[in-house]
Image: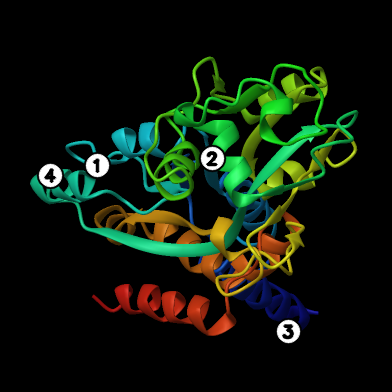
C-alpha cells in the first residue's frame, strides 16, 4: 500500500509538472499565444479577412483576439501609418501609394505587401432591370463618366428605356473607388450626381430599391447578394463575359476588370508581437480556401507559398 501510495504521489507530481510546462492538451494552439491582432482597411477585403480571423481564433489560437474593421483602404492606411505603430495590418483593394510608402519610411515602419486573392469589379443592376443585362466596356465607361453625358438609359443604347440612370458606388475612402476611377475610367471625372457610400450593404440596399440603378463594387458583395441583384455581363471585345470565380483571373476572360487585393503587414509589429506574425502565416497558408468561400478567385498556390516562406523567415530574425 505504501509503494502504491508513493507511485500515485509521484505520478501526480509528474502530471502537474507537465501541465505547468505546457505538456497538456492545448487544442493545437501552437504554444498558446495571447494578445490581440488589429486589422483595418478595405471593405472589399473585409469578408475574406473576417473569415480567416474567425477560423484562426476557433481552430488555432483561442486566446488571441483578431479584430477586423473596414474603414476603407485609404482611411485604413491613415490608421496603419501612425508614429509608434498603428494597426498591425491594413487590408487594401489597391496597391499602396508612393506617398503612403514615403510616410511609412518617414515613420520607420517596414511594410510588407501580401497579395491575398483576386477580385473582379462587378457592375450590378436592379432585379427588374431587363434591358442592361449585357454592356460593352465602353458603355460602362460612358455611364459612369461625366464627359459622355449619358443621362438616360436611352442615351446609352437604342431600345433602352427613356428613364434617368441612377449611378451608385463606394466613396473615396475605398480602394475600389480608386481602382474604378484610375484603371477603368482612366481618371475621367465621375458622372455628376453619383451616389457614393461608405458601406457596401447600403449600396446593395439602394440598388434593390431602384429599378433604374446601376452600381459598381467587388464581386464578393454581389456573390453574397445574388438573390437581390443582377450582375451585368461585360463585352470586352470578344463577346459578353459574366463575372465568376472562373473568369476573374489575371489572364482570364474578365481580366480588364480584375484586380489583386492585399493585406499590408507592419513588420515591426510582427516581430514584437508573436501573435501578429503567427496570424500572418496562418492567413497566407489558408488564403486559397478562404478566398473561394468569400467570393474571391484564389491566387496560385506557389504565389501564396512564397509569402509563407518570407513570413517564416521573419521568425529567424
Q: Residue at x 9, y 45 (%)?
A: 106
- Please name the residue that numbered disc 4 is placed on: 107
152 left or right of 45 in image: right
> For the residue carrying disc 4, how many other residues have a C-alpha within 10 Å: few (<14), some (14-19), or many (20+)?
some
Location of residue 266 in the rendering, given as x and y in whole percent from the top left corner: 30, 53
> For the residue carrying disc 2, how many other residues have a C-alpha within 10 Å: few (<14), some (14-19), or many (20+)?
many
Q: Most extreme residue toward the left, as rendered?
A: 106
- Please name the residue that numbered disc 3 is placed on: 3
97 left or right of 99 in image: right
- What distance separates the C-alpha of mark 4 from that of mark 1? 9 Å
Of the two numbered discs 4 and 1 in the rendering, the one whose residue sits closer to the viewer: 4
Location of residue 163 in the rendering, given as x and y in whole percent from the top left corner: 76, 17
Of the two numbered discs 3 and 1 in the rendering, the one whose residue sits closer to the viewer: 1
Q: Earlier in the sequence, mark 3 or mark 2?
A: 3
- What distance separates the C-alpha of mark 3 from that of mark 4? 67 Å
Residue 182, picture quadrant: top left
Residue 127 drawn above or below residue 195: below
Residue 85 circle label? 1
- What distance separates the C-alpha of mark 2 from that of mark 4? 23 Å
Q: Nearer the viewer, residue 285 or 103?
A: 103
Q: Is residue 61 visible?
A: no
- Please name the residue that numbered disc 2 is placed on: 68
Q: Which quadrant would the N terminus be assigned to in this image?
A: bottom right
Amino acid at each position: 500500500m505504501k509503494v502504491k501510495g508513493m507511485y500515485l504521489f509521484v505520478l501526480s507530481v509528474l502530471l502537474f509538472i507537465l501541465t505547468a510546462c505546457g505538456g497538456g492538451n492545448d487544442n493545437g494552439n501552437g504554444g498558446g499565444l495571447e494578445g490581440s491582432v488589429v486589422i483595418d482597411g478595405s471593405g472589399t477585403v473585409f469578408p475574406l479577412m473576417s473569415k480567416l480571423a474567425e477560423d484562426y481564433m476557433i481552430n488555432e489560437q483561442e486566446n488571441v483576439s483578431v479584430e477586423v474593421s473596414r474603414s476603407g483602404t485609404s482611411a485604413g492606411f491613415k490608421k496603419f501609418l501612425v508614429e509608434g505603430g498603428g494597426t498591425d495590418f491594413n487590408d487594401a483593394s489597391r496597391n499602396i501609394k508612393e506617398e503612403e510608402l514615403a510616410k511609412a519610411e518617414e515613420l520607420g515602419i517596414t511594410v510588407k505587401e501580401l497579395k491575398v486573392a483576386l477580385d473582379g469589379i462587378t457592375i450590378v443592376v436592379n432585379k427588374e432591370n431587363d434591358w442592361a443585362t449585357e454592356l460593352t466596356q465602353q458603355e460602362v465607361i460612358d455611364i459612369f463618366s461625366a464627359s459622355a453625358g449619358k443621362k438616360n438609359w436611352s442615351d446609352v443604347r437604342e431600345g433602352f428605356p427613356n428613364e434617368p440612370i441612377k449611378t451608385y458606388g463606394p466613396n473615396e475612402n475605398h480602394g475600389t473607388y480608386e481602382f474604378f476611377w484610375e484603371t477603368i475610367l482612366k481618371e475621367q471625372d465621375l458622372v455628376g450626381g453619383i451616389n457614393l457610400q461608405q458601406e457596401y450593404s447600403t449600396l446593395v440596399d439602394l440598388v434593390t430599391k431602384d429599378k433604374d440603378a446601376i452600381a459598381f463594387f467587388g464581386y464578393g458583395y454581389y456573390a453574397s447578394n445574388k438573390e437581390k441583384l443582377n450582375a451585368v455581363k461585360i463585352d470586352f471585345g470578344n463577346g459578353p463575359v459574366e463575372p465568376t470565380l472562373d473568369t476573374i483571373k489575371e489572364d482570364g476572360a474578365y481580366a480588364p476588370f480584375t484586380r489583386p487585393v492585399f493585406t499590408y503587414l507592419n513588420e515591426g509589429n510582427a516581430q514584437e508581437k508573436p501573435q501578429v506574425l503567427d496570424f500572418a502565416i496562418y492567413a497566407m497558408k489558408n488564403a486559397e480556401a478562404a478566398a473561394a468561400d468569400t467570393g474571391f478567385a484564389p491566387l496560385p498556390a506557389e504565389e501564396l507559398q512564397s509569402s509563407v516562406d518570407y513570413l517564416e523567415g521573419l521568425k529567424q530574425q
